[in-house]
Amino acid sequence: MTSQDDLFHPVIELPEATRRARYDRLVGLDDMKLRLRKEAALLADPRRLQAWAANHHGRDVAALNLFTDRAPLFVFAGDVGSGKSALAESFGCDLSDYLNLPVYLYRLKLATRGSGLVGEMTSLIGDAFTHMHDAGRRATGAHGVRSVQILVVDEADALVQSRAAQQMHHEDRAGVDAFLAGIDGLAGAQVPVIVVLCTNRVGALDPALMRRAAATFTFTRPDDYQRHAVLTQALQGLDIGSGTINKLVELTGPSIDRPGYTYSDLTQRLVPAAVFHAFPDRPVRDDDLLALAEELQPTPVFTEER
Ligand SMILES: Nc1ncnc2c1ncn2[C@@H]1O[C@H](COP(=O)(O)OP(=O)(O)O)[C@@H](O)[C@H]1O
Ligand SMILES: [Mg+2]
């Protein structure tokens, strides 16, 4: 069996200051955050649902049964640079506050795959789920759940591709199957483990996987309002005029020949580029930002051919 260090990046206990700040800075995902909090809370600790039914309906309700066999899987799909990884690795902070329990963040090392050994991908995934299962079991006691474990499988593009995909290597198909088996094993076990799978290839997602997911969240590029919020936040303290921010919102939006900026185009390219222009001799000026917004090309939309 693969050791924990070979399977996962170092496990992180949440809440943690950096990740909480990252969670708070994510714009335009409020509906998702709220839904995720509720879904995750119920998956992690189904007793809360019974308590709610007893409280508000005075008894058990039939609807509760609908929740028992749900797989503890969330799929985060959509455009690059739209907050999938950032949310996957930080929503545990919110969940921890909400449940008043520690949350442990596990991130699968998918990099281990591809060394070419047949069956390696399959056993990697199988072992990872076994680890999570054990951790979940250890966190479950007579008086309920003591902690929640979140497993993030990021950049799972190859893994989740439809098994029908022609060009799909045999090894990868086995990977999807192993993943599905792992999820199914968790679903019946009633352990506080939640799996989040992130992928840019929403179109290529395996249907069996989509069916299992408790929820699939689709991440998109920011609209005008969201770009305004991100820019205002990112430019805070630089004395940029509100007229300039409005102009930037316009310049970074979609046009006939190209898509709009992604969130990360704004936070990791446009604003840092303006800072580098000015550093170290002068302050950032409105014109720097406007010129850069004219010049920088947004990240192309991810298409299946690439
Ligand atoms: N919704 C958002 N609100 C604010 N910033 C965002 C948002 N989405 C992405 N970003 C910025 O872009 C960076 C990269 O996002 P990331 O989560 O890695 O994208 P993805 O995993 O979807 O490709 C984040 O660290 C953050 O700075
Ligand atoms: Mg990512």
Image (tube, rainbow, N blue to C red):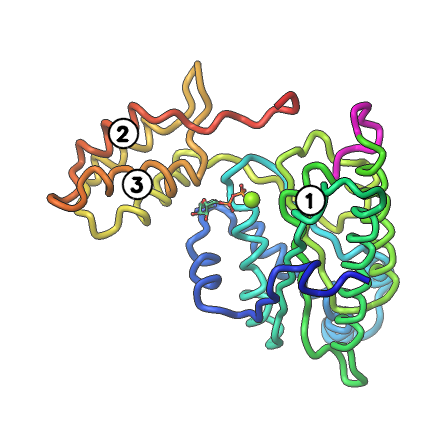
Q: Residue at x 36, y 29 (%)?
A: 252
Q: Residues within 10 Å of mark 3 (few under 14, many from 20)?
A: many
Mark 1, other Cα within 10 Å: few <14 / some 14–19 / many ≥20:
some
Amino acid type, label 3: Val
Q: Is residue 137 above or below residue 267?
A: below
| Residue type, numbered disc 1 | Thr
Q: Position of residue 263 (x, y in %)?
A: 44, 39
**Which residue is pictured at 46% across the width and 29% down the height?**
299
- In the image, farthest residue toward the top: 257
Q: Is residue 186 above or below residue 247?
A: below
Q: Which residue is mark 1?
A: 216
Q: Which residue is mark 2?
A: 292
Whether 222 is among the magenta residues is no
Q: Secondary structure at mark 3?
A: helix
Q: Which residues are magenta?
A: 160-168
108 horizontally vs 68: left or right: left
Q: Quadrant of the C terminus?
A: top right
Residue 114 lies in quadrant: top right
Q: Is residue 28 visible in the rendered structure shown here?
A: yes
Identity, as a three-letter code, of the amino acid under mark 2: Leu
- Percent position (x, y) of residue 110? 68, 48
Closest to the camera, between mark 3 and mark 1, is 3
Please say if 199 is above or below 90.
above
Q: Please tell me in which quadrant of the rendered image residue 51 appears.
A: bottom right
Residue 150 or 213: which is nearer the viewer? 150
Residue beneath label 3, please?
Answer: 271
Type of secondary structure dominating the magenta stretch:
loop
Does residue 91 appear left or right of residue 233 in this picture? right
